[in-house]
Image (cartoon, rainbow, N blue to C red):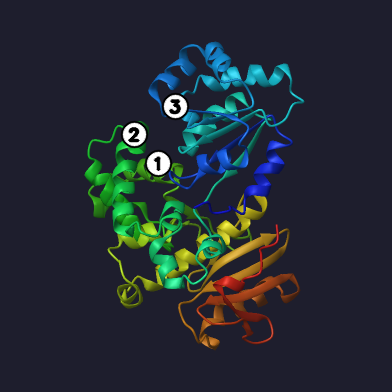
């Protein structure tokens, strides 16, 4: 079953204007399938095949004779030498757009090579897992709780017979063996997996690397290095705080989130709706899910996301989207009946920033329909949150 991706039009725009476009994202988010579906007339080669990667490294001229443009080059991080040759090919006819479409799952490593060789020649897109609207396009009756538990990996919704626990167990095993071993000389994959699980238990919280390192039994410098790998492979997302230079009491540490709610629930040992709703992690899981939907909404419209949180020593607003001096403000709450207690910090921040500077403010919760919670604030169901301005 093919699931239409909402980022389709943004990729088409880049391919029509840039000589090369690179699509990054976590493994199994559908990068290869999306490009092959969207560009059926292009050639295709995956550098996951060792012999192809070897020729791309040793003999790029011969490689491109076998795979001429226009072509989709899959998992190009396996052949970093290819980027220099791509630059030469692009510069021979810089005006021709869309000749090379690239994919890669190891973002930091990939972009290091791309930025060195293809600066000014490359369009970049980051593919997220499926958003709730994309999932509902093929399964209109899926509940919020089912959606959160199953997550957004396309295979789980293209084939509903796959058991969630089987998918995520295999996903983690493959991730540890393929990505972690290739990016790091990790002495203990067991310790690395414990770090992932420790991150899951802290999703939605301020990042404290010392606490993470202590719980896993590794040094803070090792925890920092391993967290970079989790970010590079889109398992973990760090949300930075928004603050002005004049407000010195604001929190400066980022918040940590697991990128996909299904993976988060699996790591936390939550496998049913009843255990989800009874879990002490339910509030953090809901906040993680809301953050992922806001992020996907922005990425699918413009190809990137821009979001922060706001906090001082005693108050916090979960999500702040800044637009050149104007703001969208959102709190994530599990309640189906928000009240004045859920809006107190929003009211404080609206007053602090100036009401005229607020585009919209709301509590994203489990209500059935949007309704006002006072003059400036609205209760929003996750399915009806207005698209963030870009």
| N-term-proximal mark, 3 vs 2 | 3
Q: Mark 3 points at which residue?
A: 78
Q: How far apart are marks 3 and 1 (CA)?
A: 16 Å
Q: Which residue is drawn at 68% across and 32% down?
A: 98
Q: Is residue 354 above or below residue 179?
A: below
Q: Distance between the residues labelled 3 and 2?
A: 15 Å
Residue lying farthest to the front in this orientation: 1
CB of mark 3 within 8 Å of CB of mark 2?
Answer: no
Residue 51, which numbered label? none
Residue 184, which numbered label? 2
Q: Can residue 74 be seen in this view?
A: yes
- Circle 3 SS class: helix
Q: Can residue 213 be seen in this view?
A: no
- 248 lies left or right of 262: right
CB of mark 2 within 8 Å of CB of mark 1?
Answer: yes
Q: Which residue is drawn at 50% across and 11% down?
A: 59
Q: Where is residue 345 in the image (x, y as percent from the top left)?
A: 55, 78
Q: Tell which of 62 and 237 is nearer to you.
A: 62
For residue 328, which quarter of the picture? bottom right
Q: Which residue is drawn at 34% across and 38% down?
A: 180
Q: Position of residue 188 (x, y in %)?
A: 22, 39
Q: Distance between the residues labelled 2 and 1?
A: 8 Å
- Circle 1 SS class: helix
Q: Position of residue 286 (x, y in %)?
A: 44, 70
Q: Where is residue 330 in the image (x, y as percent from the top left)?
A: 58, 71
């Amino acid at each position: 079953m093919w699931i239409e991706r909402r980022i389709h039009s943004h990729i088409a725009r880049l391919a029509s204007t840039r000589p090369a476009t690179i699509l990054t994202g976590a493994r199994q988010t559908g990068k290869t399938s999306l490009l092959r579906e969207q560009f059926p007339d292009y050639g295709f080669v995956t550098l996951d095949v060792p012999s192809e990667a070897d020729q791309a490294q040793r003999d790029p001229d011969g490689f491109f004779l076998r795979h001429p443009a226009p072509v989709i080059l899959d998992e190009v991080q396996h052949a970093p030498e290819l980027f220099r040759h791509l630059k030469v090919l692009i510069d021979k006819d810089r005006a021709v757009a869309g000749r090379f479409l690239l994919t890669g799952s190891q973002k930091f490593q990939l972009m290091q090579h791309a930025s060195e060789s293809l600066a000014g020649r490359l369009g970049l897109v980051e593919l997220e897992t499926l958003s709730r609207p994309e999932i509902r396009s093929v399964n209109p009756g899926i509940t919020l709780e089912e959606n959160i538990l199953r997550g957004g990996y396309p295979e789980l919704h293209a084939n509903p017979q796959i058991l969630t626990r089987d998918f995520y167990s295999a996903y983690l095993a493959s991730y540890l063996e393929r990505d972690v071993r290739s990016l790091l000389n990790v002495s203990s994959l067991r310790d690395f997996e414990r770090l992932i699980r420790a991150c899951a238990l802290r999703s939605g919280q301020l990042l404290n690397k010392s606490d993470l390192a202590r719980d896993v039994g590794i040094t803070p410098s090792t925890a920092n290095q391993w967290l970079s790998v989790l970010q590079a492979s889109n398992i973990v997302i760090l949300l930075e705080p928004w603050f002005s230079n004049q407000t010195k009491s604001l929190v400066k540490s980022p918040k940590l989130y697991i990128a996909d709610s299904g993976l988060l629930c699996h790591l936390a040992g939550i496998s049913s709706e009843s255990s989800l709703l009874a879990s002490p992690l339910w509030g953090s899981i809901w906040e993680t899910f809301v953050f992922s939907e806001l992020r996907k909404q922005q990425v699918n419209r413009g190809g990137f996301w821009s979001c922060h949180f706001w906090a001082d020593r005693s108050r916090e607003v979960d999500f702040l989207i800044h637009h050149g001096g104007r703001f969208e403000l959102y709190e994530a709450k599990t309640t189906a009946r928000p009240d004045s207690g859920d809006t107190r910090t929003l009211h404080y921040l609206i007053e602090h920033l100036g009401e005229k500077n607020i585009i919209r403010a709301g509590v994203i919760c489990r209500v059935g329909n949007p309704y006002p919670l006072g003059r400036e604030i609205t209760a929003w169901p996750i399915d009806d949150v207005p698209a963030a301005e870009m």
